[in-house]
Amino acid sequence: MSLLCNGDVDRPLRIEVLDWDKHGKHELIGQVETSVRALMDSNGHPLHVIDPVRKAKKGAKYLNEGTLHATYTYVEQNPTFTDFIAGGLHISLVVAIDFTASNGDPATPDSLHYNSPLPDHLNPYQQAIQSVCTVLDPYDTDKMYPVYGFGAKVRDPATKKFSPALHCFPVYGGGLEVHGVDGIMQAYRDCLSNVMLSGPTLFGPIIRATHEINQQQVFTQENQHYTVLLIITDGVINDFDMTKAAIIEASSDPISIVIVG
């Protein structure tokens, strides 16, 4: 509507009817002077197609060049994302963190995972978590966020031995979900001391895990959910085809995938 008539249903519109020519030299048959309101109110009644030149020549004897019928005209309402939120849409945030070796040794200051002893010095992963999650946090009612890691070997708390490389594991040792943005930050810091960076970088398992979470939801008009999957990575991806397949598989979900890296 904004492009057609700037939201004004009474704004004059001109519809031109052309005689199509395959060589591109389309000839004007005539035009209809109308408005959005007139089209909606026409109820399929004929609208005269007028050739101004022929009308000027023939005067009162001129009728039309034919008629145009707007048999089904309506204005489709497309709610904005803000409208959905105002209507009670529940936002669910899922965070996935890249623990592959290409990020560098967390013990060294040049690592993307460097855990500085200075409280105000945040590494790129912490900055991304704060920047994105604090924006979405007010719209999540329970503030409980699944947080995954991928591309690392995880220390077994009982045996202290490391697992083979895992590509979708809970960052928080006490379960999948943490509470609030502070919970995400704390779980991330704790995880750094319990993983060995490895690889490769695979997004497919993370997207499929998020898809499985969505499949457990009951979506109704009164119970609407929208998931934002935030994948924070160093920019390398090793399963491009599998990732595409996972995105296609999840394409029917109400989900956005945000990749920061």
Image (cartoon, grey):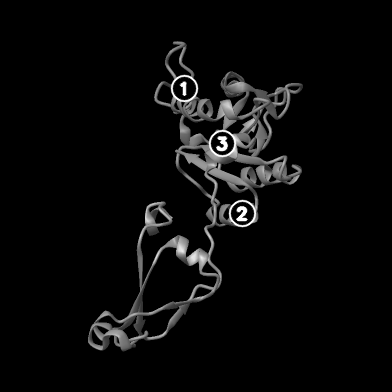
Q: Is residue 223 above or below residue 160?
A: below
> Do the residues bearing badges 2 and 3 touch, measured as CB atoms within 8 Å?
no
Q: Quadrant of the N terminus?
A: bottom left
Is 70 in front, or is 100? 70
Mark 1: which secondary structure?
A: loop
Q: Residue at x 41, y 63 (%)?
A: 35
Q: Is residue 180 left or right of residue 60?
A: right
The type of residue carrying mark 2 is: Ser
Between circles 2 and 1, the one closer to the viewer is 2
Between circles 2 and 3, the one closer to the viewer is 2
> Do the residues bearing badges 2 and 1 touch, measured as CB atoms within 8 Å?
no
Q: Is residue 191 above or below residue 80?
A: above
From this viewpoint, is residue 172 visible? yes
Residue under pointer 3: 198
Badge number at residue 251: 2
Assess disc 2: are there few (<14), some (14-19) or many (≥20) residues with their C-alpha within 10 Å of its C-alpha.
Answer: few
Is 96 in front, or is 239? 96
Give the mark nearer the N terminus: 1 vs 3. Answer: 1
Q: Quadrant of the C terminus?
A: top left
Give the mark nearer the N terminus: 2 vs 1. Answer: 1
Please, which residue is most extreme toward the front here?
A: 60
Q: Quadrant of residue 142?
A: top right
Q: Residue at x 59, y 36 (%)?
A: 85
Q: Residue at x 41, y 21 (%)?
A: 109
Residue under pointer 1: 114
| Mark 2 to mark 3 CA distance (whole Å) | 29 Å
Between circles 1 and 3, the one closer to the viewer is 1
Q: Is residue 13 left or right of residue 173?
A: left
The type of residue carrying mark 3 is: Ser
